[in-house]
Image: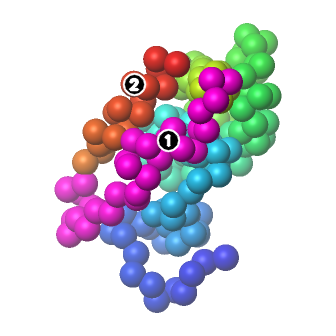
């Protein structure tokens, strides 16, 4: 369900209903559910070099292909699964990006096996507070941030 249609929206939002729903109901809404955070981190990784709407249009395919982003199931995916994923036209068929999802699942499980809560871990990179940007022109917004880079490096080390 969309929020009120006369709401102020960011300049990057098109009139695509999928984009509107994402903007109105997910963008900028703090998320603490670890599975939802895992999904978003994985999808953000798929976006590299592409537009967000490209990934959004494939999100349901990713959910299907990656067991609704259940990290336990994703971590068990093997080379046979990878070959199937690489043939799936509903996904961005880039081996490195697809492998990153499986590696992220393994990292998340390793982190939690050490007693670390994944949601707390992710939020710790922004001092447990959303970062609010007020760019007059969305084209001036950076494509990455120090917290995002730090999170990425930390996940790689796990």
Question: Does residue 59 appear anywhere in the picture?
Answer: no
Mark 2 neighbour class, 10 Å CA radius: few under 14, some 14 to 19, many 20 or more: few
- Residue shown at the point (59%, 33%) measured from the top left: 116
Helix, strand or loop under label 2: helix
Q: Is residue 13 above or below residue 141?
A: below
**Image location of residue 145, percent across then percent down:** 29, 42
Q: Which image quadrant is residue 137 in?
A: bottom left
Q: Is residue 102 above or below residue 127?
A: above
Q: Which residues are magenta?
A: 113-141
**Image location of residue 40, percent across then percent down:** 56, 45
Q: Nearer the viewer, residue 107 or 80?
A: 107
Q: How is the image coloured?
A: rainbow
User: Would residue 114 be counted in the magenta stretch?
Assistant: yes
User: Would residue 21 be counted in the magenta stretch?
Assistant: no
Tag 1 residue? 122
Label located before the other in sequence (1 or 2): 1
Tag 2 residue? 153
Distance from the alpha carbon under mark 1 to that under mark 2? 12 Å
**Rendered image: mark on residue 40:** none
């Amino acid at each position: 369900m969309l929020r009120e249609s006369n709401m102020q929206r960011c300049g990057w939002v098109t009139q695509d209903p999928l984009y509107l729903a994402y903007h109105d109901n997910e963008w900028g809404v703090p998320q603490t559910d670890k599975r939802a955070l895992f999904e978003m981190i994985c999808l953000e990784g798929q976006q590299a070099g592409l537009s967000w709407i490209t990934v959004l249009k494939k999100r349901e395919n990713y959910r299907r292909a990656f067991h609704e982003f259940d990290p336990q199931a994703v971590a068990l995916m093997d080379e046979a699964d990878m070959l199937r994923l690489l043939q799936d036209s509903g996904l961005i068929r880039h081996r490195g990006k697809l492998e990153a999802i499986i590696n992220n699942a393994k990292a998340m499980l390793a982190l939690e096996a050490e007693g670390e809560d994944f949601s707390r871990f992710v939020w710790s990179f922004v001092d447990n507070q959303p970062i609010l940007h007020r760019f007059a022109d969305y084209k001036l917004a950076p494509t990455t941030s120090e917290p995002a880079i730090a999170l990425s490096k930390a996940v790689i080390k796990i």
